[in-house]
Amino acid sequence: MDLVGAMLKILQGPNLWNVLPDLMMFMLPLWTAVLFGVLVGWVWRPRWANSAINNLSTTCLPPKNYSSIDIVSSIPSFNSLKSQLPSCLFPFSDGSPEVSSSEPASISFSDTSSSKLDTERKNFVGEGDLEHLSKLVEEKDEGPSWIGMMEKSTSNMSYQAWKREPEIGPPQYRSRSVYEDTTPELMRDFFWDDEFRLKWDDMLIEAETLEECQENGTMVVKWVRKFPFFCSDREYIIGRRIWDSDKTYYCVTKGVQYPSVPRRTKPRRVDLYYSSWMIRAVESRKGDGEMSACEVLLFHHEDMGIPWEIAKLGVRQGMWGAVKKIDRGLRWYQKHMSSGAPLSHCGYMAHINSKVSQAHLRYLNNNTTNDSTQEIERCEELVNDEKPSGKNLGKILVVGGAIALACTVDRGLLTKAVIFGVARRFAKMGRRL
């Protein structure tokens, strides 16, 4: 009603020339919203829009092939970015939800999980991955410089975070967390324990062990992470392995190709995924000289199928709340294990480590070969194969018009949910229009 009243007031002007400037000022926010909607519509090409275009094309135009993604999978929200970084450090949440004591949603072990990694397949995660992680820890990977993002602390932990943006691939994140009154071994088991993770990580709804090697501890697991109701869940096929160098643990987890688990429309497979950390004992900040604290250096990047610029806003907004949630989960795990609870199967697998000497790590750090860039490029090709092709103008106008309507008609919940959900900055911009 306010919109209609304002329009009528403008049209009641004495003549056209007096009305025209006010009318132009009135239309400017609307056209701004339309242009923004067209741009967003070009980035996210929804399946229902493609279907409509295809139906028109079959009757009016020569046939063409269109590929698309589901708008439900494409519209981001702030909570959906909980999957953008690893649950072990960044399971995003705007607030800090309480740790749930509910039973695990789903945990299973494949019939092929018992020592099925044969000689040719034991290297889902190999020495090249150890080399890459060691170079990241020592800052010898020849990548871009790290830029500081955050530095905060609580009574029993401290936290620092950095980021960088390489020329190829998504933004990369590095963090350093120091937890008081815990051991590297407990921290290692905590990160590896999928059964317990299902209790404290409310975004993980399924965890399945596909294969494992009892000789070196290599595992292949499948995760399904929950998104809000208007987004598709995400599926991860993760290879992981731990190296032990004099009680300093190098833990590698990364996305791997696993053809025996076919791709599905939902949940959507995330191919480019890297989340690895180094764990070691450090001196407590209590000043008593005891090595009773645990340092965790984590390195993470992934491409979950949303624009990276939007993802970066979500990371910044949700980072600290997620870190505090991890600390609560760790303290709960400490109490759980100190009560005499048995070690889970995944926790047991965390005890099977590959031994590596400090001298060998120094040799790897001085090695000039590094396949990390090639791996990112290969995963980028897989991701690009799933992205929609074609630049049909009708497709852009259909979805652009729908989002423009959301901008102009509803300045509240609808606008935030469709466009500005992941970034409060965008939400404030929407209210100003």
Image: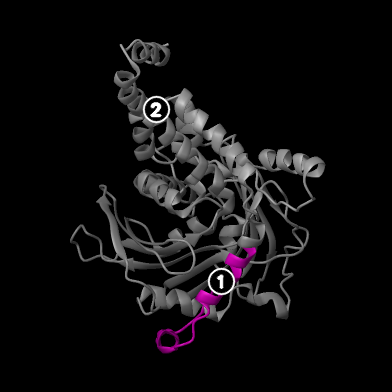
**Which residue in the structure is indicated by mark 1?**
377
Residue at (45, 62) in percent of width and height: 300
Question: Mark 1 to mark 2: distance in Å?
Answer: 45 Å
Tell me: residue 224, above or below residue 18.
below
**Which residue in the structure is indicated by mark 2?**
27
**Amino acid type indicated by mark 1:** Glu
Tell me: residue 252, above or below residue 267.
below
Q: Secondary structure at mark 2?
A: helix
**Amino acid type indicated by mark 2:** Met
Tell me: residue 379, above or below residue 181.
below
In the picture, residue 258 is in which quadrant? bottom right
Nearer the observer, 97 or 189: 97
Tell me: residue 142, above or below residue 51.
below
Residue at (43, 84) in percent of width and height: 361
Residue at (39, 15) in percent of width and height: 7
Left of 38 or right of it: where is 98? left
Residue 181, position as x, y percentages in the image: 32, 55
Magenta range? 353-382
